[in-house]
Amino acid sequence: MTRAQASFNQQYRLVFDALRIQHVHLSPDRFSKIDQYHSIADKMGDIFVQYDLPRPERANNRRVDGWRLCYTLLDTDGLAVLDSCPDVIDSIPKLMRDEKNIEDAQKEGHELFLDVCEAFRYGAMSYASEQVTPGGSDAARDPEDHQQHAEVPTLSGAQFTAAACRHRVHDSEAPVVTAT
């Protein structure tokens, strides 16, 4: 092997390792048992591990916090949606507020755009939830002390843009995949 080939192989390995899928987030309802022993997440996980992929994890399902995070990041250019994600680009403008809770988004219906938006929120919120929050762990906070209130972890725009570029969003039945 030549020095150029070895250098190329080393660079390829670095890129491959950087793009390796670290997390697969599924809707929490995918963890309900569909038979006596297994959930859809269990069955998917059994297949994923055969291909050296991680087992699915429950997506963070805090709806209002998730929509606040998505709105804030989109509004402040802290989140980028690439043109390789046309479903997200087409779906977000169609999303309406929930009539019963104006801080939440519409969640009822069978339109595909709702599933795409939910998967987008799951990915954003689940990635943000994995990050270290300023001021320590949630367990150390007094839930009654509103001065410490920080339900949504803070990420820099660059961190979140990088994360958004690594999410693949389809519908709520499909996993949201995060590579780091």
Image (spheres, rainbow, N blue to C red):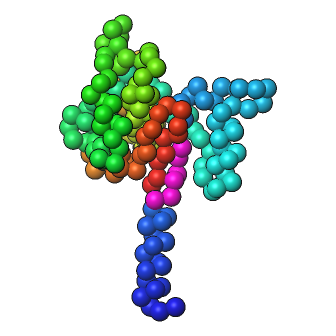
Residue placed farthest to the left in the image?
A: 76
Q: Nearer the viewer, residue 174 or 152?
A: 174
Image: 73 above or below 111: below
Image quadrant occupied by the C terminus: bottom left
Residue lying farthest to the right in this orientation: 36
Is residue 108 shown above or below 88? above
User: Which of the pair 167/114 is nearer the observer?
Assistant: 114
- Give the quadrant of residue 33: top right
Q: Is residue 155 above or below residue 100?
A: below
Q: Main secondary structure of the magenta part?
A: strand
- Farthest residue toward the top? 100
Tally the marks.
0
Q: Residue at x 49, y 64 (%)?
A: 17
Range covered by the magenta-colored residues: 19-24
| Residue at image location 76% in from the left, 26% down from the top | 35
Residue pushed farthest bottom?
Answer: 2
Q: Residue at point 30% right, 37% down?
A: 89
Q: Position of residue 111 (x, y in %)?
A: 42, 22
Q: Is residue 138 magenta?
A: no
Front residue of 126 and 170:
170
Q: Is residue 27 above or below residue 22?
A: above
Give the left or right position of residue 150, taking residue 41 as reference. left
Please identify the quarter of the rendering in which residue 30 is found. top right
Q: Position of residue 142 (x, y in %)?
A: 44, 24
Residue 94 position, x and y percent, is 30, 24
Question: Can residue 56 be seen in this snapshot?
Answer: yes
Identified at 45% across, 62% down, the residue is 18
Q: Position of residue 158 (x, y in %)?
A: 28, 50
